[in-house]
Image: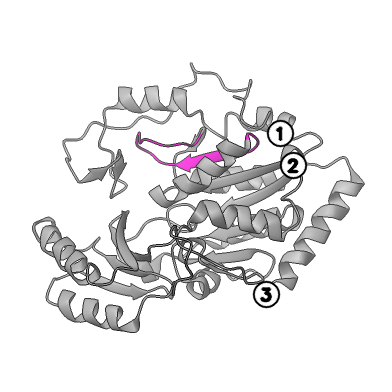
Amino acid sequence: MGLQRSPSYKPNAQPKPIPETKNEENKVNGYSTTNEPIFLNSSYNSWVVEHPSALRSFDGMMKATKGKRIVVFLDYDGTLSPIVNDPELAIMSNEMRKAVCKVAKKFPTAIISGRCRDKVKEFVKLSNVCYAGSHGMDIMAPPRAVKSSDGKNHNISPDKKIYRILEEKTKTIQGARVEDNRFCISVHYRQVRDEDYGMLEETVKSVVETYQEFHVTEGKKVLEVRPSIEWNKGHALEYLLETLGFSNSSTDVLPFYIGDDRSDEDAFKVIRRRGHGYPIIVSSIPKDTGALYSLCDPSEVLTFLKKLAGRREKSSSYRTLARFRVKAIENLK
């Protein structure tokens, strides 16, 4: 039921117009590395028909949640906060913080980010949500063995030596910024000149290729050094559902996952595989995605969360359960 299209969505309702642009920036699997529109307006309109607005579909979604239990998962950068040139300035608004807090009071809520968990917690400043950093490898929850695809235990924290080498080798590239996220290292290039990107990419990959247990992935204007283990935001979503006591009740649990980046696709896949839930992509441009619904930008995420927080629950037992789950999240800290 959760994966069905909402009957409230009307394809003839026109989305926000997106201007034509000649920008031809780097894209991987349809993903842009900036928020600038790169497709014609007609392409975006067609894409939105395939990925309906979660706002226009909200009433239909809520009808499908009747008798179900909602669990909310949120990305941070580009979802709760805008994408900015300086990652240290990706601050969520007080209005967004209040909305997330209200949602978390009603439904178990977790924030899963590529950032260091402590950094995300510092940005969000809420005690009633669960935090998962480094793409879900750093979770405020009981420990669980992490193994790579070869079945062996591995060190999942990059050697500090890698961080120091990357800092040293990229310091001559103007605008490059290396961030230690504990279980992964992010090399930001949003302020790097286009003509210097190739050199930066080659530098990062040449450093990492000497460490077989790590590999390089790419996000929005960021190269990330991550452990070569079978663990991602999808695994984090499953882990948190299990930790919160939802693993054996997949048919009556509806996870809502809202995110904007390639790393969120792993979580979208898990929800689609479960057959129940709402994977929602945040994007103002068309992109290849496993999400079924869309929101244009963080301002629409804010509106959606406000609507979700304002949803009335008729069942007092459900409200009691929600309070129990919130308490369980607090106990994980």
- Asked if residue 152 lies left or right of residue 275, the reply is left
Give how far across and how far down residue 302 sits, in percent. 56, 49
Decide if residue 14 is on the left or right side of residue 43. right
Q: What residue type is labelled 1?
A: Met
Identify the disc placed on residue 333: 3
Mark 3 to mark 1: distance in Å? 30 Å
Label 1 close to label 2 by CB (< 8 Å): yes
Q: Nearer the viewer, mark 3 or mark 1?
A: 3
User: Toward which corner of the image does residue 204 lie, by quadrant?
Assistant: bottom left
Task: Please name the residue that numbered disc 1 is placed on.
Answer: 62
Query: Do the residues bearing badges 2 and 3 touch, measured as CB atoms within 8 Å?
Result: no
The magenta stretch is: 275-291
x then y, percent, for residue 34: 29, 49
What element does badge 3 sit on? loop
Task: Pick whichever of labels 1 and 2 is earlier in the sequence.
Answer: 1
Q: Which three-letter amino acid code belongs to the residue tagged 3?
A: Lys
- Report the coloring of the rendering: one colour
Q: Horizontal placement of 300 versus 99: left or right?
A: left
Residue found 42% across the figure and 37% down from its top: 289
Residue 278 in the magenta stretch? The answer is yes
Is any part of residue 112 visible from this angle? yes
Q: Is the magenta stretch mostly helix, strand or loop?
A: loop
Which element type, helix, strand or loop, lies under badge 2? loop
Residue 212's quadrant in the figure?
bottom left
Query: In the image, is residue 104 above or below residue 31?
Result: below
Distance from the alpha carbon under mark 2 to that under mark 3:
27 Å
The local crowd at label 3, few if under 14, some if 14 to 19, many if 20 or more residues have their Cα within 10 Å, is some
Q: Residue type at mark 2: give it.
A: Arg
How crowded pointer 2 is (Cα within 10 Å; few <14, some 14-19, many 20+) is rated as: few
Using the image, determine if residue 298 lies above or below residue 135.
above
